Amino acid sequence: MDKINIEIKLENSTMLAVLTGEIDHHTASKIRSLLDVEIQNNNPKFLVLDFTNITFMDSSGIGLIMGRYKLMQYIGGNLKIINPSPQIKKVMSLAGLDRLAVIERVTPKKRSDYVAEK
Amino acid sequence: MLLKNEMKLQIPSRSFNESFARVAISSFFAQLDPTIDEISDIKTAVSEAVTNSIVHGYENSIGTIYIHAKILDENTIYIKIRDRGRGIENVEKAKEPMFTTCKTGERSGLGFTVMQSFMDKLRITSKIGKGTTVILIKTLNKR
C-alpha cells in the first residue's frame, strides 16, 4: 500500500536519500522513521533529499522536511533538497522552506555523481 | 454545452485512503480536461482536507469521510469533504498559517493555507462534537 520508496547512498559525510513516489501524511511517517535511523547511525554533515522522483507532496511533506532540517541543525549538519517539481516547489514556498533550506535543480549527470562529488 | 455531473464517495478515515481520495477526485474531474497544474492543485487541496479529517476529525478512531464532488457549471468544480469527528474549536485560528493543535506528530499547520492558496474558494463550517465540513471551489481556465 505504501506509495513510497527510499534509497540511501552514503559517501564520506554526505547522505543522499533518493525518494520515489508520493509524500502525504500516510507515507511521511515511513520516510521519517527511516531517515532518522540513518541519520542517527551515520551522523552525516550533509543530508541531500532527492525529489526528482516524487510525483506528489502535500503539507505533510513540509512537516517532514522541517523536522529533518531541525535534526540536521541539531547534529551540526546541513540539508539540501534537489529537483522538486514546480507543484512541490509551490507547496514548499508556502511554508517558506525556500528560505530555510537550499533547493536546487541539478542535471541527471550531476545527480548521479552527487555523493561522489561532495 | 452545460455539462453537469457529480459523484459521492464514502471512505473510512484510514491514512492509506488519502491517496485513493485524491486520485478518485482527479479522475472524476478529468472530464473537464484540466491542466496538469490545475489537477495538481485540486489533488493537493483534497489531500489536505482528507488528512485533516483523519488526523484531527477522527483522531485515533476510525470514522467515515463523506466526499461530494460536482461540476457547478462548464468549468467550475465543487468539492465537499465532511467528517463527523470532534470538530474545530476556533476555525479562524485553525486557518492561521503554522497553527496546529497536534503536539505529537510533525504537522506543519499549513493544511488550510494550502487549500486556500490552491483553490479559489474555501469554506469551513465546524461544530464541536459534530464534525467539520470543508468546501473547495475552483474555476478552471477555459480550454
Image (cartoon, coloured by chain):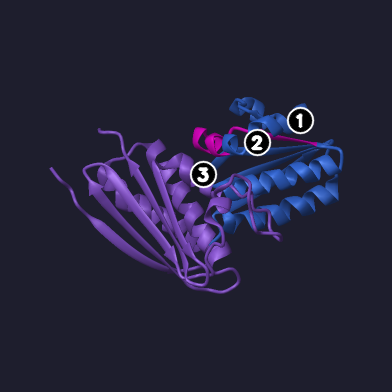
Chain colours: A blue, B purple
Q: CA distance from mark 1 to mark 2?
A: 26 Å
Q: Which mark is residue B114?
A: 3
Between discs 1 and 2, the one toward the N terminus:
2
> Is label 1 on the same chain as label 3?
no
Name the mark nearer the viewer: 1 or 3: 3
Extent of the magenta region:
A78-91
Q: Are marks 1 and 2 on the same chain?
A: yes
Q: Is residue A49 left or right of residue B120?
A: right
Q: Chain of mark 2?
A: A
Using the rendered view, name the quadrant where residue A51 is placed.
top right
- Would you name the residue on which mark 1 appears? A116
- Are callouts 2 and 3 both on one chain? no
Q: Residue furthest left?
A: B1
In the rendered structure, which amino acid carries the disc numbered 3? Val
Chain under callout 1: A
Label 1 – label 3 distance at C-alpha: 37 Å
Look at 25% across and 49% down and name the residue there: B72
Q: Secondary structure at mark 2?
A: helix
Disc 1, disc 2: CB below 8 Å? no
Amino acid at circle 1: Ala
Measuring from the top left, give residue B111's x and y in whole percent.
54, 50
Residue linked to disc 2: A97
Q: Depth check: B127 or A17 in front?
A: B127
Give the spatial CA distance, label 2 vs label 3: 14 Å
| Residue at x 68% of width, y 58% of height | B105
Q: Position of residue B100 (x, y in %)?
A: 64, 54
Rendering coords of residue B56 (x, y %):
57, 63
| Front-lying residue, A71 or A30 | A71
Find numbered disc 1 in the image and state the secondary structure of the residue it sits on: helix
